[in-house]
Image (tube, coloured by chain):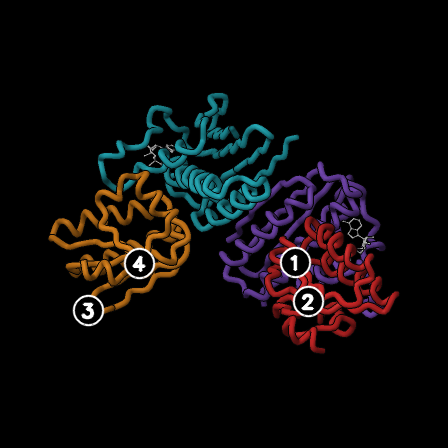
Chain colours: A red, B orange, C purple, D cyan
Amino acid sequence: MKIKSIDYKGKKIIAITGDIDMYSSPELRDEMMAHISKKATALYIDLESVTYIDSSGIATFVEGLKCMKLYGGKLQFCGIPNSILEIFRFSKLDRVFEIHSTVDDAINS
Amino acid sequence: MKIKSIDYKGKKIIAITGDIDMYSSPELRDEMMAHISKKATALYIDLESVTYIDSSGIATFVEGLKCMKLYGGKLQFCGIPNSILEIFRFSKLDRVFEIHSTVDDAINS
Amino acid sequence: MKDSITVSIPSHPKYLSVIRAITDRIGQIHEMDEKVIGDIRLAVDEACSNVIKHAYKGDVSRKIIIKYTIKPDKFQVVIEDNGLTARRKALKGRDLDDIRPGGLGIHFIKRVFDVFELDEKKKKGNRLILVKYFK
Amino acid sequence: MKDSITVSIPSHPKYLSVIRAITDRIGQIHEMDEKVIGDIRLAVDEACSNVIKHAYKGDVSRKIIIKYTIKPDKFQVVIEDNGLTARRKALKGRDLDDIRPGGLGIHFIKRVFDVFELDEKKKKGNRLILVKYFK
Ligand SMILES: Nc1ncnc2c1ncn2[C@@H]1O[C@H](COP(=O)(O)OP(=O)(O)O)[C@@H](O)[C@H]1O
Ligand SMILES: Nc1ncnc2c1ncn2[C@@H]1O[C@H](COP(=O)(O)OP(=O)(O)O)[C@@H](O)[C@H]1O
């Protein structure tokens, strides 16, 4: 897994590449929490280049969502590959995660 | 590994995709020998999409070369990825194989 | 016809990607459906993650043994450790409607495998037996 | 620090791709150079192919055991079979200038591994020890 935090049109995007698993998710958590501890009002997670996600990766996002809700921040997802969307659906997370097809769609939503 | 025999500008091209190893090389041999048994004057091996080759794959090509030489046929290679070219060089086969960068270069040679 | 492949690997999360690569290749060699391969890859990964987290309590220097058996009618994966023996009753995912971190691994395993069973004959540690039947 | 991974696999050429995938992943996890990983992947594949061809004479239903050990200063791969014991003198690649099919496998193994040694203590079958030192 590789992570990059990007400023795009004034928004914070976390772009992830590769496999999110029990080995890599702590690094993802650190990156996400760094933004959340600064009370980022919106955080965009770009999953377009993610090749795999397991329950530890999902748990990381659920935690981020819960933390952001506490102060009214929004966690948004974009570019989700179908195989990962299917896992989100199975886990009933498509109902609580805000999902958009592209970063621009997410920003304009 | 996937193999496709193609007629291109009146020439016989064998385009290979994936890994050539001890498991897949017999299929490659069959395909190549089918052309050679018909005394194909020239045979173009397109390696552009080959991701791996081992000694059994190389042995297959050396056999093809030897068989074609017997009747004056020509075995030509094109699109060789660098990692495979390096193996050909190490095996001193770059000296006996006719190597071109593209199929068109090979045909026009 | 029965092929089996056994892998013994350290209980370090960095090796989970090796397990996934093996699972993937075995699925492809046996021409399983891509979606099924993906589900099995996730399930085996989750089962191994659980061994690291729960049976070994995060100790990354233990051993996990994974045995894949492929028969014409079924695909079996047996995962063994010699850590803390699990209480069968604890082996339960959370309610999927109760959204919170964790509790998804067993759901991911059970959605693709028809059999999810702890071998009671195993004295020390755990032997988890997963079976998927080919219909 | 010493990590080891052991794989037991049928002597069928279709499983060579599993061995390659494992070798690849281990190399990547230990941040080896991409070129070195490629060379090791080929070498281990060739050693296993030789077991199938020479020690097992093409019998695809036997077992090959591959043990990878990673230490800070070296990477060791041990390949075991219980087939025909090799005569050490026969373990020789052909002259590279004598272009003909075959005889390249051992060259591919020796160009990347610093040690290429048959364990004499092994009674039945073969135990090939390959070591690469990290400089
Ligand atoms: N290998 C195991 N050994 C012991 N307990 C386990 C094991 N796997 C799962 N469990 C128990 O089952 C519960 C549910 O597991 P799971 O659905 O994977 O979610 P999580 O691991 O995130 O809690 C765990 O919290 C744990 O109590
Ligand atoms: N595992 C083995 N058991 C017995 N003999 C072997 C083994 N590996 C290699 N050899 C011998 O070494 C020779 C050279 O091997 P290699 O360079 O791989 O070329 P090839 O296998 O194409 O002949 C083989 O022809 C064989 O006689």
Residue at the spot 15% in from the left edge and 49% down from the top edge: B69
Q: Are marks 1 and 3 on the same chain?
A: no
Q: Which mark is residue C60?
A: none
Q: Which mark is residue B46?
A: 4
Q: Residue furthest right?
A: A70
Front position in the image: B63 or C88: B63
At which x and y percent is residue D80? 49, 33
Relative to A9, B70 lies left or right: left
Q: Residue furthest front?
A: A10
Q: Label 3 amino acid?
A: Gly
> Given this view, does label 2 or label 1 mark the residue nearer the observer?
2
Q: Label 1 amino acid?
A: Leu
Give the residue at mark 3: B10
> Given this view, does label 4 or label 1 mark the residue nearer the observer?
4
Q: Secondary structure at mark 3?
A: loop
At which x and y percent is residue C14? 65, 45
Q: CA distance from mark 3 to mark 2?
A: 49 Å
Whether D82 is drawn above or below C36: the answer is above
Q: Which mark is residue C42?
A: 1
Q: Secondary structure at mark 2?
A: helix
Q: Chain of mark 3?
A: B
Q: Is label 2 in contact with label 1 (beta carbons under 8 Å)?
A: yes
